[in-house]
Image: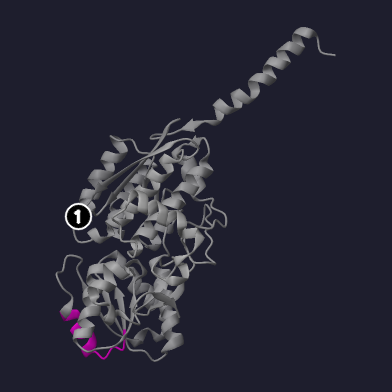
Amino acid sequence: MHHPIQRRALVLALAAAPLAGRTQAKKYGPGTSDTEIRIGQTLPYSGPASAYAQLGRAEAAHFKFLNDNGGINGRKINFMSLDDGYAPPKAVELTRKLVEQDEVALIFGVLGTAVNVGTRRYLNQKKVPQLFISAGSDTFAQPEQFPWTMGWQPTLRAEARFYARSILAERPDAKIGVLYQDDDFGKELLAGLTDGLGDKAKQIVSAQSFQATDPTVDSQLITLKDKGADTLMLFAYARHSAQSIRKAADLRWQPDIYLHLGSASVSATLAPAGLENATKVRTAGFIKDITDPQWAKDPDLAPFIATMKKYQPDANLDDALYIMGWAIALTLEQVLRQCGDDLTRENIMRQAANLKEWRNPALLPGSLISTSPTDFRVVEYMKLQRFNGKTWAFV
Protein backbone atom coordinates (compact mmCIF):
# COMPACT_ATOMS: atom_id res chain seq x y z
CA MET A 1 0.00 0.00 0.00
CA HIS A 2 1.30 3.47 -0.93
CA HIS A 3 1.15 6.11 1.78
CA PRO A 4 -1.69 8.62 0.88
CA ILE A 5 0.80 11.41 0.24
CA GLN A 6 2.96 9.14 -1.92
CA ARG A 7 -0.15 7.94 -3.75
CA ARG A 8 -1.27 11.52 -4.44
CA ALA A 9 2.23 12.34 -5.75
CA LEU A 10 2.05 9.28 -8.01
CA VAL A 11 -1.39 10.28 -9.37
CA LEU A 12 -0.12 13.81 -10.05
CA ALA A 13 2.99 12.40 -11.72
CA LEU A 14 0.91 10.10 -13.93
CA ALA A 15 -1.49 12.91 -14.82
CA ALA A 16 1.43 15.14 -15.79
CA ALA A 17 3.26 12.41 -17.71
CA PRO A 18 1.34 12.51 -21.01
CA LEU A 19 1.50 16.31 -20.92
CA ALA A 20 5.24 16.27 -20.30
CA GLY A 21 5.60 13.69 -23.08
CA ARG A 22 3.68 15.90 -25.46
CA THR A 23 5.58 19.09 -24.72
CA GLN A 24 8.90 17.25 -24.91
CA ALA A 25 7.95 15.64 -28.24
CA LYS A 26 7.49 18.99 -30.01
CA LYS A 27 10.85 19.93 -31.47
CA TYR A 28 11.38 22.82 -33.81
CA GLY A 29 14.26 23.97 -35.95
CA PRO A 30 14.47 27.15 -38.07
CA GLY A 31 11.34 27.86 -40.10
CA THR A 32 8.98 25.65 -38.09
CA SER A 33 6.61 26.31 -35.19
CA ASP A 34 3.21 25.28 -33.82
CA THR A 35 1.58 27.13 -36.70
CA GLU A 36 3.82 27.02 -39.78
CA ILE A 37 6.46 25.29 -41.85
CA ARG A 38 8.49 27.63 -44.09
CA ILE A 39 9.69 26.18 -47.38
CA GLY A 40 12.07 27.95 -49.77
CA GLN A 41 12.56 27.48 -53.50
CA THR A 42 14.15 29.15 -56.51
CA LEU A 43 12.88 28.41 -60.03
CA PRO A 44 13.24 29.91 -63.52
CA TYR A 45 10.08 32.05 -63.76
CA SER A 46 12.07 33.94 -66.43
CA GLY A 47 14.99 33.09 -68.74
CA PRO A 48 15.82 30.11 -71.01
CA ALA A 49 14.13 27.44 -68.84
CA SER A 50 10.98 29.40 -67.89
CA ALA A 51 8.75 26.60 -69.30
CA TYR A 52 9.63 24.76 -66.08
CA ALA A 53 8.03 27.40 -63.83
CA GLN A 54 4.86 25.26 -64.03
CA LEU A 55 6.51 22.98 -61.45
CA GLY A 56 6.42 25.75 -58.85
CA ARG A 57 2.86 26.75 -59.79
CA ALA A 58 1.61 23.18 -59.27
CA GLU A 59 3.52 22.87 -55.98
CA ALA A 60 2.07 26.19 -54.75
CA ALA A 61 -1.44 24.97 -55.66
CA HIS A 62 -0.98 21.77 -53.62
CA PHE A 63 0.31 23.68 -50.60
CA LYS A 64 -2.68 26.07 -50.81
CA PHE A 65 -4.98 23.04 -50.93
CA LEU A 66 -3.26 21.61 -47.83
CA ASN A 67 -3.51 24.95 -45.98
CA ASP A 68 -7.24 25.19 -46.73
CA ASN A 69 -7.64 21.68 -45.32
CA GLY A 70 -5.89 22.07 -41.99
CA GLY A 71 -2.27 22.07 -43.15
CA ILE A 72 0.16 19.28 -42.24
CA ASN A 73 -0.31 18.04 -38.66
CA GLY A 74 -2.10 21.37 -38.02
CA ARG A 75 0.66 23.57 -39.47
CA LYS A 76 0.29 25.83 -42.50
CA ILE A 77 2.86 25.72 -45.30
CA ASN A 78 4.47 29.08 -46.03
CA PHE A 79 5.93 28.49 -49.52
CA MET A 80 8.38 31.10 -50.84
CA SER A 81 9.27 30.50 -54.49
CA LEU A 82 11.62 33.06 -56.09
CA ASP A 83 12.80 33.64 -59.68
CA ASP A 84 16.41 32.53 -60.27
CA GLY A 85 16.24 32.90 -64.07
CA TYR A 86 18.07 29.52 -64.31
CA ALA A 87 21.30 31.34 -63.34
CA PRO A 88 23.43 29.65 -60.65
CA PRO A 89 24.85 32.94 -59.20
CA LYS A 90 21.31 34.34 -58.82
CA ALA A 91 20.13 31.07 -57.24
CA VAL A 92 23.01 31.19 -54.71
CA GLU A 93 22.14 34.77 -53.73
CA LEU A 94 18.40 33.98 -53.34
CA THR A 95 19.09 30.74 -51.47
CA ARG A 96 21.21 32.63 -48.93
CA LYS A 97 18.37 35.12 -48.51
CA LEU A 98 15.82 32.33 -47.98
CA VAL A 99 18.02 30.60 -45.40
CA GLU A 100 19.46 33.60 -43.55
CA GLN A 101 16.69 36.22 -43.75
CA ASP A 102 13.47 34.24 -44.31
CA GLU A 103 14.74 31.37 -42.13
CA VAL A 104 13.14 28.59 -44.17
CA ALA A 105 13.24 25.05 -42.78
CA LEU A 106 14.40 23.58 -46.09
CA ILE A 107 15.00 24.27 -49.79
CA PHE A 108 12.71 22.28 -52.08
CA GLY A 109 12.24 21.28 -55.71
CA VAL A 110 14.83 23.55 -57.34
CA LEU A 111 15.30 22.98 -61.10
CA GLY A 112 18.54 22.25 -62.89
CA THR A 113 21.81 20.44 -62.28
CA ALA A 114 24.08 23.51 -62.41
CA VAL A 115 21.77 25.56 -60.16
CA ASN A 116 21.60 22.84 -57.48
CA VAL A 117 25.33 22.12 -57.65
CA GLY A 118 25.82 25.88 -57.18
CA THR A 119 23.94 25.95 -53.84
CA ARG A 120 24.75 22.45 -52.58
CA ARG A 121 27.98 23.13 -50.67
CA TYR A 122 26.44 26.11 -48.85
CA LEU A 123 23.29 24.14 -47.90
CA ASN A 124 25.31 21.13 -46.70
CA GLN A 125 27.61 23.36 -44.63
CA LYS A 126 24.56 25.05 -43.08
CA LYS A 127 22.85 21.63 -42.64
CA VAL A 128 19.73 22.77 -44.51
CA PRO A 129 17.79 19.99 -46.29
CA GLN A 130 18.00 20.39 -50.11
CA LEU A 131 15.10 18.12 -50.99
CA PHE A 132 13.53 16.63 -54.11
CA ILE A 133 15.58 18.47 -56.68
CA SER A 134 14.16 18.71 -60.21
CA ALA A 135 17.33 17.43 -61.84
CA GLY A 136 18.57 13.89 -62.21
CA SER A 137 22.28 14.04 -61.51
CA ASP A 138 23.64 10.96 -59.74
CA THR A 139 25.49 13.36 -57.45
CA PHE A 140 22.12 14.26 -55.85
CA ALA A 141 21.97 10.66 -54.54
CA GLN A 142 25.29 10.56 -52.67
CA PRO A 143 24.49 10.60 -48.94
CA GLU A 144 28.07 9.89 -47.93
CA GLN A 145 29.28 13.10 -49.62
CA PHE A 146 26.19 15.31 -49.43
CA PRO A 147 23.98 14.09 -46.56
CA TRP A 148 21.60 17.10 -46.85
CA THR A 149 20.90 16.77 -50.62
CA MET A 150 18.34 14.45 -52.22
CA GLY A 151 17.02 14.29 -55.79
CA TRP A 152 13.61 13.03 -56.84
CA GLN A 153 13.31 11.87 -60.46
CA PRO A 154 15.17 8.86 -61.92
CA THR A 155 18.88 9.67 -62.13
CA LEU A 156 20.31 10.75 -65.49
CA ARG A 157 22.74 7.83 -65.53
CA ALA A 158 19.96 5.31 -64.84
CA GLU A 159 17.78 6.92 -67.52
CA ALA A 160 20.53 6.82 -70.17
CA ARG A 161 21.41 3.20 -69.31
CA PHE A 162 17.71 2.38 -69.70
CA TYR A 163 17.81 3.86 -73.25
CA ALA A 164 20.96 1.88 -74.05
CA ARG A 165 19.18 -1.38 -73.12
CA SER A 166 16.13 -0.37 -75.17
CA ILE A 167 18.23 0.45 -78.26
CA LEU A 168 20.25 -2.77 -78.05
CA ALA A 169 17.03 -4.79 -77.77
CA GLU A 170 15.21 -3.03 -80.60
CA ARG A 171 17.97 -2.04 -83.03
CA PRO A 172 21.21 -3.81 -82.03
CA ASP A 173 23.19 -2.35 -84.95
CA ALA A 174 21.92 1.23 -84.40
CA LYS A 175 24.09 4.14 -85.53
CA ILE A 176 23.59 6.54 -82.64
CA GLY A 177 23.82 10.33 -82.82
CA VAL A 178 23.75 12.34 -79.58
CA LEU A 179 22.79 15.97 -79.07
CA TYR A 180 23.71 17.03 -75.54
CA GLN A 181 23.69 20.22 -73.50
CA ASP A 182 27.32 21.08 -72.72
CA ASP A 183 27.11 20.98 -68.92
CA ASP A 184 26.90 18.44 -66.09
CA PHE A 185 23.36 17.48 -67.13
CA GLY A 186 24.14 16.64 -70.77
CA LYS A 187 27.52 15.09 -70.04
CA GLU A 188 26.08 12.77 -67.40
CA LEU A 189 23.44 11.46 -69.82
CA LEU A 190 26.13 10.91 -72.46
CA ALA A 191 28.33 9.08 -69.91
CA GLY A 192 25.37 6.90 -68.83
CA LEU A 193 24.59 6.00 -72.46
CA THR A 194 28.23 5.12 -73.22
CA ASP A 195 28.37 3.09 -70.03
CA GLY A 196 25.07 1.28 -70.83
CA LEU A 197 26.17 0.42 -74.38
CA GLY A 198 29.38 -1.15 -73.08
CA ASP A 199 31.38 -2.62 -75.99
CA LYS A 200 28.71 -1.30 -78.39
CA ALA A 201 29.59 2.31 -77.46
CA LYS A 202 31.50 2.57 -80.76
CA GLN A 203 28.05 2.67 -82.40
CA ILE A 204 27.82 6.31 -81.27
CA VAL A 205 28.73 7.83 -84.65
CA SER A 206 28.69 11.43 -83.40
CA ALA A 207 28.01 13.44 -80.24
CA GLN A 208 27.29 17.14 -80.77
CA SER A 209 27.14 19.62 -77.89
CA PHE A 210 25.40 22.99 -77.51
CA GLN A 211 25.16 25.72 -74.86
CA ALA A 212 21.92 26.26 -72.91
CA THR A 213 21.91 29.85 -74.23
CA ASP A 214 22.38 28.91 -77.93
CA PRO A 215 19.52 30.28 -80.09
CA THR A 216 19.40 27.15 -82.29
CA VAL A 217 20.91 23.67 -82.71
CA ASP A 218 20.38 23.46 -86.49
CA SER A 219 24.04 22.97 -87.40
CA GLN A 220 24.42 20.15 -84.86
CA LEU A 221 21.37 18.35 -86.31
CA ILE A 222 22.77 18.65 -89.85
CA THR A 223 26.08 17.14 -88.68
CA LEU A 224 24.34 14.23 -86.93
CA LYS A 225 22.31 13.45 -90.04
CA ASP A 226 25.43 13.66 -92.25
CA LYS A 227 27.21 11.16 -89.99
CA GLY A 228 24.53 8.61 -90.87
CA ALA A 229 22.83 8.38 -87.47
CA ASP A 230 19.58 6.38 -87.52
CA THR A 231 18.97 6.84 -83.78
CA LEU A 232 18.96 10.31 -82.21
CA MET A 233 19.37 10.97 -78.48
CA LEU A 234 18.06 14.35 -77.32
CA PHE A 235 19.84 15.09 -74.05
CA ALA A 236 18.35 18.58 -73.90
CA TYR A 237 15.60 20.57 -72.24
CA ALA A 238 12.27 21.51 -73.82
CA ARG A 239 13.27 24.38 -76.12
CA HIS A 240 16.25 22.71 -77.84
CA SER A 241 14.46 19.34 -77.95
CA ALA A 242 11.50 20.95 -79.76
CA GLN A 243 13.87 22.65 -82.23
CA SER A 244 15.66 19.34 -82.87
CA ILE A 245 12.49 17.37 -83.61
CA ARG A 246 11.31 20.11 -85.98
CA LYS A 247 14.72 20.36 -87.68
CA ALA A 248 14.91 16.58 -88.23
CA ALA A 249 11.52 16.80 -89.97
CA ASP A 250 12.71 19.77 -92.09
CA LEU A 251 15.71 17.66 -93.13
CA ARG A 252 13.36 14.76 -94.04
CA TRP A 253 15.41 12.68 -91.63
CA GLN A 254 13.53 10.01 -89.67
CA PRO A 255 15.77 8.55 -86.97
CA ASP A 256 14.43 6.77 -83.88
CA ILE A 257 14.31 9.67 -81.41
CA TYR A 258 14.86 9.22 -77.67
CA LEU A 259 13.92 12.25 -75.57
CA HIS A 260 15.17 13.07 -72.04
CA LEU A 261 12.30 12.31 -69.64
CA GLY A 262 12.44 15.82 -68.15
CA SER A 263 11.51 17.19 -71.60
CA ALA A 264 8.72 14.72 -72.35
CA SER A 265 5.99 17.34 -72.15
CA VAL A 266 3.41 17.37 -74.95
CA SER A 267 2.72 21.10 -74.54
CA ALA A 268 6.26 22.36 -73.74
CA THR A 269 8.20 20.22 -76.25
CA LEU A 270 6.12 18.18 -78.69
CA ALA A 271 3.49 20.79 -79.62
CA PRO A 272 6.15 23.45 -80.49
CA ALA A 273 7.97 20.75 -82.50
CA GLY A 274 4.75 19.93 -84.38
CA LEU A 275 2.85 16.88 -83.12
CA GLU A 276 3.01 15.31 -86.58
CA ASN A 277 6.84 15.50 -86.39
CA ALA A 278 6.92 14.00 -82.90
CA THR A 279 5.10 10.73 -83.52
CA LYS A 280 7.24 7.76 -82.48
CA VAL A 281 9.46 9.85 -80.17
CA ARG A 282 10.40 7.62 -77.22
CA THR A 283 11.08 8.46 -73.59
CA ALA A 284 11.45 6.79 -70.20
CA GLY A 285 8.00 7.10 -68.65
CA PHE A 286 7.68 7.16 -64.88
CA ILE A 287 4.65 9.38 -64.28
CA LYS A 288 1.01 9.15 -65.43
CA ASP A 289 0.28 11.20 -68.54
CA ILE A 290 -2.97 13.06 -67.92
CA THR A 291 -3.63 13.35 -71.69
CA ASP A 292 -3.73 9.55 -71.97
CA PRO A 293 -7.30 8.15 -71.96
CA GLN A 294 -6.20 5.27 -69.69
CA TRP A 295 -5.68 7.76 -66.83
CA ALA A 296 -8.59 10.10 -67.66
CA LYS A 297 -10.89 8.50 -65.06
CA ASP A 298 -8.14 7.44 -62.64
CA PRO A 299 -9.45 8.06 -59.10
CA ASP A 300 -5.85 8.63 -57.94
CA LEU A 301 -5.65 11.73 -60.14
CA ALA A 302 -9.02 13.24 -59.18
CA PRO A 303 -7.46 15.25 -56.30
CA PHE A 304 -4.84 16.64 -58.73
CA ILE A 305 -7.48 17.80 -61.22
CA ALA A 306 -9.66 19.30 -58.45
CA THR A 307 -6.68 21.13 -56.90
CA MET A 308 -5.59 22.62 -60.22
CA LYS A 309 -9.14 23.68 -61.16
CA LYS A 310 -9.45 25.56 -57.88
CA TYR A 311 -5.96 27.01 -57.37
CA GLN A 312 -4.50 27.15 -60.91
CA PRO A 313 -7.61 27.59 -63.10
CA ASP A 314 -5.58 28.80 -66.10
CA ALA A 315 -3.25 25.79 -66.05
CA ASN A 316 -3.10 23.68 -69.20
CA LEU A 317 -3.02 20.25 -67.55
CA ASP A 318 -1.77 18.69 -70.80
CA ASP A 319 1.58 20.14 -69.71
CA ALA A 320 3.18 17.20 -67.87
CA LEU A 321 5.09 19.62 -65.64
CA TYR A 322 1.94 20.29 -63.60
CA ILE A 323 1.45 16.66 -62.59
CA MET A 324 5.19 16.40 -61.96
CA GLY A 325 5.07 19.40 -59.60
CA TRP A 326 2.08 17.87 -57.81
CA ALA A 327 3.90 14.53 -57.45
CA ILE A 328 7.01 16.22 -55.99
CA ALA A 329 4.86 18.25 -53.56
CA LEU A 330 3.08 15.06 -52.42
CA THR A 331 6.46 13.51 -51.65
CA LEU A 332 7.41 16.45 -49.43
CA GLU A 333 3.98 16.32 -47.77
CA GLN A 334 4.57 12.65 -46.92
CA VAL A 335 7.98 13.44 -45.37
CA LEU A 336 6.56 16.30 -43.29
CA ARG A 337 3.66 14.11 -42.11
CA GLN A 338 6.17 11.46 -41.01
CA CYS A 339 8.01 14.15 -39.02
CA GLY A 340 5.05 14.52 -36.68
CA ASP A 341 5.94 17.12 -34.04
CA ASP A 342 9.72 16.86 -34.54
CA LEU A 343 10.36 19.49 -37.20
CA THR A 344 14.08 19.92 -36.73
CA ARG A 345 16.09 19.96 -39.94
CA GLU A 346 17.78 16.73 -38.78
CA ASN A 347 14.45 14.91 -38.48
CA ILE A 348 13.15 16.29 -41.80
CA MET A 349 16.24 14.76 -43.45
CA ARG A 350 15.89 11.54 -41.41
CA GLN A 351 12.29 11.08 -42.60
CA ALA A 352 13.20 11.84 -46.23
CA ALA A 353 15.69 8.97 -45.94
CA ASN A 354 13.06 6.71 -44.39
CA LEU A 355 10.29 6.39 -47.00
CA LYS A 356 9.16 2.74 -47.03
CA GLU A 357 7.41 1.39 -50.13
CA TRP A 358 5.42 4.61 -50.28
CA ARG A 359 2.99 4.81 -53.19
CA ASN A 360 2.82 8.20 -54.92
CA PRO A 361 -0.51 8.30 -56.82
CA ALA A 362 0.96 10.29 -59.73
CA LEU A 363 3.55 7.63 -60.60
CA LEU A 364 3.02 4.63 -62.87
CA PRO A 365 1.51 1.50 -61.32
CA GLY A 366 4.33 -0.67 -60.00
CA SER A 367 6.31 2.32 -58.75
CA LEU A 368 6.99 2.39 -55.00
CA ILE A 369 9.30 4.86 -53.27
CA SER A 370 11.79 3.50 -50.74
CA THR A 371 14.74 5.48 -49.41
CA SER A 372 17.29 4.76 -46.68
CA PRO A 373 20.23 6.57 -45.07
CA THR A 374 22.48 4.92 -47.68
CA ASP A 375 20.06 5.12 -50.65
CA PHE A 376 18.88 8.60 -51.65
CA ARG A 377 17.32 7.54 -54.99
CA VAL A 378 13.62 8.39 -54.85
CA VAL A 379 11.84 7.53 -58.14
CA GLU A 380 13.48 4.53 -59.82
CA TYR A 381 10.76 2.75 -61.81
CA MET A 382 10.67 3.49 -65.58
CA LYS A 383 8.83 2.09 -68.62
CA LEU A 384 9.56 2.85 -72.28
CA GLN A 385 6.87 5.05 -73.85
CA ARG A 386 6.31 6.18 -77.43
CA PHE A 387 4.32 9.23 -78.54
CA ASN A 388 1.44 8.24 -80.85
CA GLY A 389 0.54 11.74 -82.05
CA LYS A 390 -1.81 12.36 -79.12
CA THR A 391 -0.44 10.72 -75.97
CA TRP A 392 2.41 8.59 -74.64
CA ALA A 393 1.73 4.86 -75.07
CA PHE A 394 3.73 2.03 -73.48
CA VAL A 395 5.96 0.23 -75.94
Percent coordinates x, y for residue 312 in the rendering? 32, 52
Residue at the right extreme, as displayed: 1
Quadrant in which the N terminus is drawn: top right
Splitting the image into 4 quarters, where does residue 153 fall?
bottom left
Q: In the displayed structure, does residue 222 sit left or right of residue 196?
A: left
Q: Residue at x 35, y 58 (%)?
A: 322
Percent coordinates x, y for residue 225 in the rendering? 23, 87
Percent coordinates x, y for residue 350 in the rendering? 50, 45
Q: In the displayed structure, does residue 36 sit left or right of residue 14?
A: left
Q: Nearer the viewer, residue 340 or 347?
A: 340
Splitting the image into 4 quarters, where does residue 226 fall?
bottom left
Q: Dot 1: what SS?
A: loop
**Residue type of the residue flagged with mark 1:** Ser
Does 275 sit above or below residue 38?
below
Quadrant in which the C terminus is drawn: bottom left
Does 209 sit above or below residue 339?
below
* Residue identifier under label 1: 46
State which region is magenta: 219-231
Q: Residue at x 24, y 44 (%)?
A: 94
Q: How is the image coloured?
A: one colour
Q: Nearer the viewer, residue 327 or 118?
A: 327
Q: Residue at x 20, y 54 (%)?
A: 85
Mark 1 surroundings within 10 Å by alpha-carbon count, few (fewer than 14), some (14 through 19), many (20 or more) = some
Q: Residue at x 23, y 44 (%)?
A: 93
Percent coordinates x, y for residue 363 in the rendering? 47, 63
Q: In the displayed structure, does residue 297 sit left or right of residue 128?
A: right
Residue 232 showing in the rendered view: yes
Residue at the top extreme, as displayed: 5
